Amino acid sequence: MAAPSKATVVLKAVKKIAVQFCPFESNVRSTREFLAVVGSEKTRATNMNCEVVTTVKHDKSEPVVDVTYVDGEQLVMKGAHLTCSEMMSAFQSRCTDKDPQIKDAAKK
């Protein structure tokens, strides 16, 4: 897994994560790895109200991760040219900015 092992993924500030990809394309690895991290039982337990939706297509479409935060802001990542660690970094930095408890813990 390419996800940072030290950091725990917290979905507290996230309302919905929509992942779509064509599994037969060669550029979907990072998107699938991201899905494995945010879809894991441990991560999902951090916010039981967060909806993780996966759409598997067979139309040679570009892999896309669409994150909707509780404040309505969206983060759209096109996974074709991003690594899983780049996607996780962008995702985690937005989550940290939106959750004051994580900010306080990071300062200590």
Image (cartoon, grey):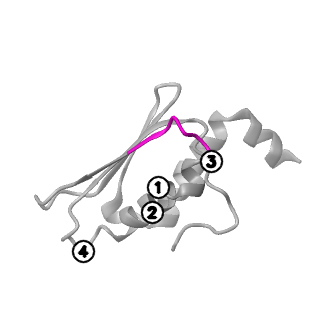
- What amino acid type is highlighted by mark number 3? Val
Residue 97 placement: quadrant? top right
Q: Are marks 4 and 1 in contact (CB under 8 Å)?
A: no
The residue identified by callout 3 is: 10
Residue 22's spot in the image, x, y percent?
20, 62
Answer left or right for 108 relative to 42.
right
The answer to whether residue 96 is magenta is no
Q: Which span is picked out in magenta?
A: 46-52
The residue identified by callout 1 is: 39
In this rendering, the label closer to the viewer, 1 or 3: 1
Q: What is the C-alpha distance between the residues marked 3 and 4?
A: 29 Å
In this rendering, the label closer to the viewer, 4 or 2: 2
Residue 15's spot in the image, x, y percent?
48, 34
Q: Secondary structure at mark 3?
A: loop
- The residue carrying pointer 4 sits among few (fewer than 14), some (14 to 19) or many (20 or more) residues within 10 Å by Cα, namely few
Q: Secondary structure at mark 4?
A: loop
Q: Residue at x 54, y 56 (%)?
A: 41
